[in-house]
Image (cartoon, rainbow, N blue to C red):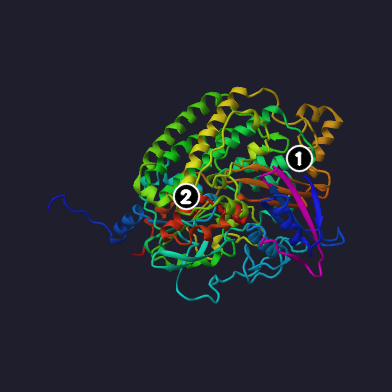
């Protein structure tokens, strides 16, 4: 990826130029890195930009000294930058001048220090905080507290809403209730041990997180994986996309009062979980991919079982859409509610079904194809209005497209190994471990020291269920990642939530939240 | 009167009623919550054990199901929810995170909810299977039957 350096006092000017002249309309990610003792300037802020017009990526790096860690804010250029900058401030203590509301986002105000700095010990605990009033000095009008313990907010999102009757006038969100320090934990484990942690990012589609992370490390190490492993990865990605959408739609419609659909969607989901259990032994937290391939081969019955499940899926989709598309209550509660325009969606860094519902046909699988996605025959569904209705309907159609891809994968599935033969990542065969010194040494090195990618950095991204799932990995050549930043699609999507619900009824807030399919594990990490 | 009455202790009748009509309040924060959805949906069907009537107001529930990682930010919320439930009340701690913090041993996660509220049944697993949730309900019912107070 092309990388440029910018001065911390000129980044705003540069950002404006890149957005207006070079057409970088998306800011995908912003993160900090702490090079304590390795570089002259301690911190670095890394921006990842994307231009949908030129289909081009760009990385900007800004060096920040330790004694005055201050950078110009770009939140006026891309709306997405607002929360990303707050997160960077929260975890690294880097200040962004010109930011409208620079305060902690994942942690709480009483927290002392910045946990992702290298000199903060991972297990240094602090006292339990007291929940705060989010309104601060703006107490006029009628405010209610919504969440975090509320069936629609799933125990992890909190909002304060200003109401006029049932109409929402203002909304202040608070996140961070499920911050379990994925990034700090990843720095504390070796590369292979990080895979189980990725399961728990978007836990509705763990397999896809496994694929995204493994792909990033493979890029970093320059490992090629066998063809069969690629096809298996496409198969598991598309199946978990289906599960994710089934859960999203099922629970979304439950929140609107339609319980029946939930049984239809969950029946198919259980059938897919039966298969997932056969490949890895677990239902939800799969830990299935390995760096260099997958853990074990898929069972032989897959080629009969999965097409049968897809028929059941097709039936379930037509049953559920049959209940919904002419349902007056459903239409009234979803059409033109919580709409976002294509420009706003780009500025907020939307990706995935929520962006496509707004009419932008951007899909990583088409724009930057990986694992033969360009060889399969499938379409990218888009919506018109970017409202709740479109988001739900795009998900329905995506499931049908995923089913199309899966059928082609099963047809074309090649034979051969499922793990790379590269002994930097894969354990050698047992016969060679017991009979040759090279095999024994490889085994010993990999077990005792783990894999050691060369020093460098990589930003690798895949199409997750909710959008672009990116992993930015910095390696210092050691057995543990120096820094891993996850680009969570939900983080960008949820940021626009207050804008989406303003002016609508309080009950719509629930329906809109469900249609965004925000997963706390990924949002708060 | 013949065979039209039976003699028992009042506590036993009350316990029998309580154990067969548990009203759970799901406090689902993370992955375990998704498996709870599996447990209440059609295949596993928690209503076979009389505990399908989930209440999202703690004031109407007598069983608190804590599912998922509890961070320090979340801890005061959980404690408040527990205090809002009327007695008698029971707590099931579902999954490794709620029981012990799981493999999240860091600055932000509580190392087990029993640091702040009492727990009756612990379910191991990351996440536990829906069958384990059903078993925990049965275990809790066994415990309720043995209780002596009204």
Taking the spot 45% from the left edge, 53% from the top edge, the residue there is A337
Q: Which mark is residue A219?
A: 1
Q: Residues within 10 Å of mark 2 (few under 14, many from 20)?
A: many
Query: In the image, A189: left or right of B116?
Result: right
Q: Which residue is mark 2?
A: A388
Quadrant where the N terminus of chain A is found in the figure:
top right
Q: Is residue A74 magenta?
A: yes
Coordinates of residue A480 in the picture (x, y in percent): 77, 49
Residue A189 location (% of width, % of height): 73, 50
Towards the viewer: A179 or A342 = A342
Name the one closer to the observer, A144 or A279.
A144
Q: Nearer the viewer, residue A510 or A176?
A: A510
Would residue A82 be seen by someone viewing this image from the given angle? yes
The answer to whether residue A191 is above or below residue A113 is: above
Most extreme residue toward the left is B1
Q: Are marks 2 and 1 in contact (CB under 8 Å)?
A: no
- Specify start and end residues of the magenta stretch as a single range: A51-76
Compared across the picture, whether A84 is left or right of A312 comes to right
């Amino acid at each position: 990826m092309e990388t440029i350096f910018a001065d911390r006092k000129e980044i705003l000017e540069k950002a404006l130029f890149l957005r207006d002249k070079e057409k970088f309309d998306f800011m995908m990610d912003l993160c900090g890195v702490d090079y304590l003792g390795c570089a002259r300037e301690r911190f670095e802020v890394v921006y990842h930009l994307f231009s949908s017009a030129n289909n081009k990526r760009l990385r900007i790096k800004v060096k920040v000294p330790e004694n005055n860690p201050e950078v110009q804010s770009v939140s006026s250029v891309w709306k997405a930058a607002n929360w990303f900058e707050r997160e960077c401030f929260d975890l690294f203590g880097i200040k962004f001048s010109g930011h409208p509301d620079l305060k902690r986002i994942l942690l709480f105000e009483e927290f002392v220090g910045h946990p992702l700095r290298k000199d903060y010990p991972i297990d240094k605990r602090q006292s339990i905080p007291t929940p705060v009033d989010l309104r601060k000095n703006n107490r006029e009008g009628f405010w209610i507290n919504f969440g975090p313990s509320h069936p629609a907010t799933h125990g992890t999102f909190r909002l304060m809403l200003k109401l006029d009757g049932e109409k929402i006038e203002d909304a202040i969100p608070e996140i961070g209730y499920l911050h379990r320090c994925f990034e700090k934990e990843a720095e504390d484990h070796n590369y292979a041990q990080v895979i189980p942690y990725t399961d728990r990012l978007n836990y509705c589609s763990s397999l896809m997180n496994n694929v995204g992370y493994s792909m990033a490390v493979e890029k970093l190490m320059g490992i090629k994986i066998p063809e069969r492993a690629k096809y298996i990865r496409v198969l598991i990605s598309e199946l978990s996309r289906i599960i994710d959408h089934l859960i999203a739609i099922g629970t979304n419609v439950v929140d609107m009062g339609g319980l029946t659909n939930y049984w239809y969607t969950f029946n198919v989901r259980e059938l897919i979980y039966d298969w997932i259990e056969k490949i890895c032994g677990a239902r939800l937290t799969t830990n299935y991919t390995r760096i260099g391939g997958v853990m074990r081969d898929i069972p032989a019955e897959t080629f009969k079982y999965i097409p049968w499940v897809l028929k059941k899926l097709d039936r379930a989709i037509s049953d559920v859409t049959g209940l919904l598309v002419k349902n007056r209550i459903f239409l009234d509660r979803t059409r033109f509610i919580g709409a976002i325009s294509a420009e706003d969606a780009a500025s907020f860094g939307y990706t995935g079904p929520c962006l496509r519902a707004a009419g932008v046909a951007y899909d990583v699988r088409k724009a930057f194809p990986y694992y033969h996605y360009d060889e399969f025959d499938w379409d990218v569904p888009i919506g018109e209005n970017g409202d709740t209705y479109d988001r739900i309907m795009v998900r329905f159609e995506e499931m049908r497209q995923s089913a199309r891809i899966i059928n082609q994968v099963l047809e074309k599935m090649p034979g051969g190994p499922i793990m790379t033969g590269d002994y930097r990542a894969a354990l050698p065969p047992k016969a060679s471990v017991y009979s040759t010194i090279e095999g024994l040494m490889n085994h010993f090195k990999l077990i005792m020291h783990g894999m050691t990618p060369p020093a460098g950095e990589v930003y690798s991204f895949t199409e997750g269920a909710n959008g672009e799932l990116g992993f930015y990995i910095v390696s210092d050549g050691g057995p543990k990642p120096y820094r891993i930043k996850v680009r969570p699609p939900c983080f960008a999507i949820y940021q626009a939530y207050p804008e989406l619900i303003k002016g609508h009824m309080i009950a719509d807030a629930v329906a809109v939240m469900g249609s965004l399919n925000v997963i706390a594990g990924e949002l708060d990490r | 009167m013949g065979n039209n009455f039976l003699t028992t202790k009042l506590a036993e009748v009350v316990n029998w009623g309580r154990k067969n009509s548990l009203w759970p309040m799901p406090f689902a924060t993370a992955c375990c919550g998704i498996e709870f959805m599996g447990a209440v949906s059609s295949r596993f069907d928690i209503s076979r054990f009389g505990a399908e009537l989930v209440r999202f107001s703690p004031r109407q529930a007598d069983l608190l199901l804590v599912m998922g990682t509890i961070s320090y930010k979340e801890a005061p919320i959980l404690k408040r929810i527990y205090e809002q439930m009327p007695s008698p009340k029971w707590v099931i701690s579902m999954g490794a995170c709620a029981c012990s913090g799981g493999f999240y041993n860091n600055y932000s996660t509580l190392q087990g909810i029993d640091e702040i509220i009492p727990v009756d049944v612990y379910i191991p697993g990351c996440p536990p299977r829906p069958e384990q949730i059903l078993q925990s309900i049965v275990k809790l019912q066994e415990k309720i039957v043995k209780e002596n107070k009204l």
